[in-house]
Image (spheres, rainbow, N blue to C red):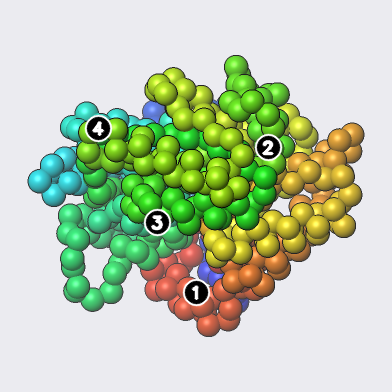
Amino acid sequence: MSDAATRATNKLLPPTAETMTALANIVGAQHALRDPDRMAPYLTEWRDRYRGEAAIVLKPGSTDEVAAVLKTANAARAAIVPQGGNTGLVGAQIPDESGSQIVLSLERLTHIRDVDLASNTMTVEAGLTLAGAQESAKSVGRLFPLSLASEGSCQIGGVLSTNAGGLAVLAYGNARDLALGLEVALADGRVWHGLKALRKDNTGYDLKNLFIGAEGTLGVITAAVLRLFPRPAEQVTCLAGLADLEDATELLARMREAAGPMLTAFEILPRIGLDFAIKHGTSLHDPLRTPHSWYVLMEISSPLAGDAVLTLIESQLGDAIDAGEVEDAVLAKSAKQTRELWQLREVMSEVQKHEGGSIKHDVSVPTGRLPEFIDRANQLVELMIPGARPVPFGHLGDGNIHYNVSQPVGMDKNVYLSNWEALNAAVHEIVLDLGGSISAEHGIGRMKRELLPHAKGAVAIDLMRSIKASFDPNGILNPGKLL
């Protein structure tokens, strides 16, 4: 932690009884949780890697209440930990173990404030789930394309605060690209009203993009203007079996050239991942006749009705098979088959729990260098932990791979997980050597905070610290996270 950050953190104080009463009065007693059993769901994340304690959990019901909470906490020098759906994977939303921090849950801010079909935008509050935003867009004949495995639980504020990616980044971009404006409560209780539905606004610094990806360290997002798109009239999903990963990059280039922006998803899955999914998933089966070393799950979408997309993908798959890039493939012929194919991808993380400990990496490298990265990382894993089982999967189309490593069969789980930091450091060195990023879409949080200076460089870290000090001079917002 920097000297400035340490000084700011040292200023923080546990909330007094008077402060706790004032905070409870702002949100209402029924929304100020102090009972340990009621607070428990807010104090740990689903992987059980981070568990904290809190003085109180507050659930404000409006932007004004959020702002009042922050103003009161800032005056008392009390730490605030903003929390959305608590689906984060790097510990950014979990308080520390001191029991002196205040969890600020945005779950009650769920209103849809406006839908503007002429501008293709929707203004929603931060506590609305991603699935709720998707359904709201669907109800008016539009598409909100951000899609994550946790979309039923994750909330818009958290999605933006971590700049989440997901399955459709290839065509639509990540969360940053899907938000036009924000409303943000600042550390001192002021509110920045930046809810503009503009594609062009060249009036100085882009404040919006400072808050997106800041993990609640600069302000608390309370509402956002989201971009909407036409709903696809035709959509085809395909699972292709391949002999090696180089063939996947060749297939990606082929499909990009043929489909352009209609290629909306391009995911890779290893055979071991498919085996885990079939073994531990619910009613999942192998869609192809024989096993393959690698699989590509891709989707092509078009706003035009007809069979043009189906014709295109059948033609390209035929050419890819003739070229030796694809060994076998299956096209989803119904909505049910589409869901079954995507479920293989969506359960890829959770089924690894059944195989014991899993050391995880959320990284990105230039797409053309992904085969090199996985080859080098696999060799490294075998040297460091013989018998460990790499399960690399994810978004080949945008270079983002979840390089997860399951423990060797029969190894003690705790012994294996004690290698987490050492293996992370070694894998990240390969990532940086290839010009990549140590965090592609999950953020920094607590998990990668100490790694960030090595990955970003001194000048970038100094600029980030200066921004933090300007927005939050008392250091109350999510202390100990990111910086």
The one of 363 and 182 positioned closer to us in this rendering: 363
Disc 2 crowd, CA 10 A, few/some/many (<14, 14-19, 20+): some
Residue 316 vs residue 206: left or right?
right
Q: Name the residue carrying label 3.
A: 257
* Contact check, label 4 and label 3, Cβ < 8 Å: no
Task: Pinpoint residue 101: horizontal percent, then vertical percent.
Answer: 54, 49
The residue where tag 1 is placed is 465
From the image, state whether disc 1 or disc 3 is nearer to you.
3
How crowded pointer 3 is (Cα within 10 Å; few <14, some 14-19, many 20+) is rated as few
Cα separation, mark 4 vs mark 3, equals 21 Å
Q: Which of the image's four quarters has the N terminus?
A: bottom right
Distance between the Cα atoms at labels 2 and 1? 48 Å
CA gap between label 4 and label 2 equals 32 Å
Look at 68% across and 62% down and name the residue there. 372
Q: Where is residue 99 in the image (x, y as percent from the top left)?
A: 61, 46
* Label 4 sits on residue: 306
Identify which residue is drawn at 87% across, 57% down.
383
Secondary structure under the numbered disc 3 in the rendered image: helix
Image point (58%, 81%), residue name: 458
Q: Which amino acid does label 1 sit on?
A: Arg
| Disc with the residue nearer the chain's start (4 vs 3) | 3
2 or 1: mark nearer the eye: 2
**Mark 1 or mark 4, which is nearer to you?**
4
Residue that protrudes farthest toward the top in the picture: 283
- For disc 2, the marked residue is 292
Across the whole image, how many numbered discs are drawn on residues?
Answer: 4
Residue 207 vertical placement versus 39 (above, below): below
Q: Which amino acid does label 2 sit on?
A: His
Q: As displayed, is residue 4 above or below residue 199? A: below
Disc 4 residue type (three-letter) = Gly
